Each structure stands twice: as C-alpha cells, then as structure tokens.
Amino acid sequence: MAASIRLARVDDAPVLARVLADAFFDDPLSDWLLPNTRRRNGALQRSMGWVMRETYLPHGGVWTTEEVDAVALWGRPGDPKPSALQQLPGLPTFVATYRRQLPRAMRASSAFEKRRPSQPHWFLDLLAVRPDRQGQGVGSALAATALAEADRVCFPTFLETSNARNVPLYERLGFVVSEEFDVGPVHVWAMLRQPMSG
C-alpha cells in the first residue's frame, strides 16, 4: 500500500522525535557521538526533536505519513538560517545530549556544514522510517514527494549520510555521490541530485 504523505503538524512532534531516535539509533554517527547505548535513544529524541521543532516545523519543512511512522526534514532555498543568538536556547539541550562528546558533535556539525553547496538548493537534513516499516518503500515515497517539488522549481537537492545502506536508496532517487569524507572514524557520503524534468 502506498504511503500517504502530508506536512507534519506541531502535535506530531513527540511521535516523530521517537521515530527519528529509533531510526538513527544504530547509525554510525550516533554510535560515535553517543557511545552510551542506555541513554542514546533519549538523547537522540531530545536533540533531533529540538532541531525538528525549532528549525524545520516553523517553515513547513517537516513531512510525514498519515500513520506518522516516517519523517523527513527539508530545508528549502531562502529558508532563514538561525543566527547564533537564535540558536542559544538550544545550547542546554545539546550540552545535555552530548555531554563529554560535545566537541565531537561540534566538529561533526562543522564538517557537514562545510560540504553544503554554495548555490541555492533543497537540503534533506534527516530522513527516518520507524524500524518495523523500513524496506517497504515508505522512505522513498516520503523523499519523492519533496523531490517532485524541488524538480518543479528547478533546484538541486543535497544530503549527507553516514550509513552505507542509505547510499543505494538515494542513488535510486537520482542522487550521486559528490564527495566522501571522514568525521573521526565515521565515513560520510555527500550526495547531490540535479533537478529532473518531465
């Protein structure tokens, strides 16, 4: 059955934070930044939930399914980028999340940000599917909805992934690897997709 895609609402946020945390629990970057597996899920819910609520929801950049079992966080060209002052309220969240690993998290964030294209683009920050729904086409359907909009307005799309299993999925959606780099022991693929016509 095809997934029914819609924009997320504020009241979806608690469930979607759990979806993000569950989907990224075994991600190589999560493993490096949050080595304590007992607190990892809660830490991911806290940090990813904050980013979703503060950065993407206010600008209509969070897509989900009617079942609220998957989520994609999208940045569009022209979306306001929070200033350092606007990001200050999130600092306690990230300190509590990463604790002694905060320097690693800041280094990773900087490395990821440096790879963003200079030209206007859509940015797929996070794509997550609840583990029991993975492999059923939900993630592809979720991504394809926003990619169709990016194609309509003729903008490229960019993402970064530290999970090798994701690379073939994104290649099927038209992304190509533009760069590979390492953040600490974690290998990362930067991927770019040019707008498709027709």
Image: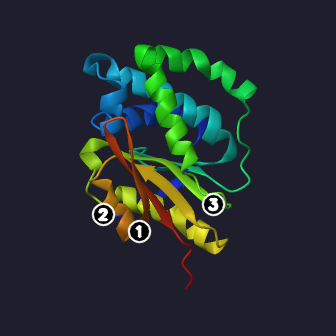
Q: Which mark is residue 121?
A: 3
**On the image, which quarter does residue 198 sit in?**
bottom right
156 with respect to 183 (left or right):
right
Tags 1 and 2 in contact by the CB under 8 Å rule?
A: no
Q: In the picture shown, does residue 151 fall above or below 180?
A: below
Real-space Cα separation, disc 2 to disc 3, in angstroms:
21 Å
Classify 83 as above or below 8.
Answer: above
Gap in Å between the C-alphas at discs 1 and 3?
Answer: 16 Å
Q: Earlier in the sequence, mark 1 or mark 3?
A: 3
Give the secondary structure at mark 2.
helix
Query: Please, what is the three-letter code of the amino acid marked with disc 1?
Result: Leu
Answer yes or no: is residue 12 visible: no
How many residues crowd mark 3 within 10 Å: few (<14), some (14–19), many (20+)?
many
**Mark 1 or mark 2, whichever is nearer to me:** 2
Amino acid type at image mark 3: His
Q: Is residue 14 above or below residue 196?
A: above
Disc 1 marks which residue?
173
Q: Residue at x 47, y 65 (%)?
A: 144
Residue extending farthest bottom: 198
Number of marks drawn? 3
Q: Amino acid at mark 2?
A: Pro
Residue that mark 2 sits on: 168
Q: Which residue is more in the foreground, 182 or 135?
A: 182
Residue in the image at 44% along x and 14% along y? 99
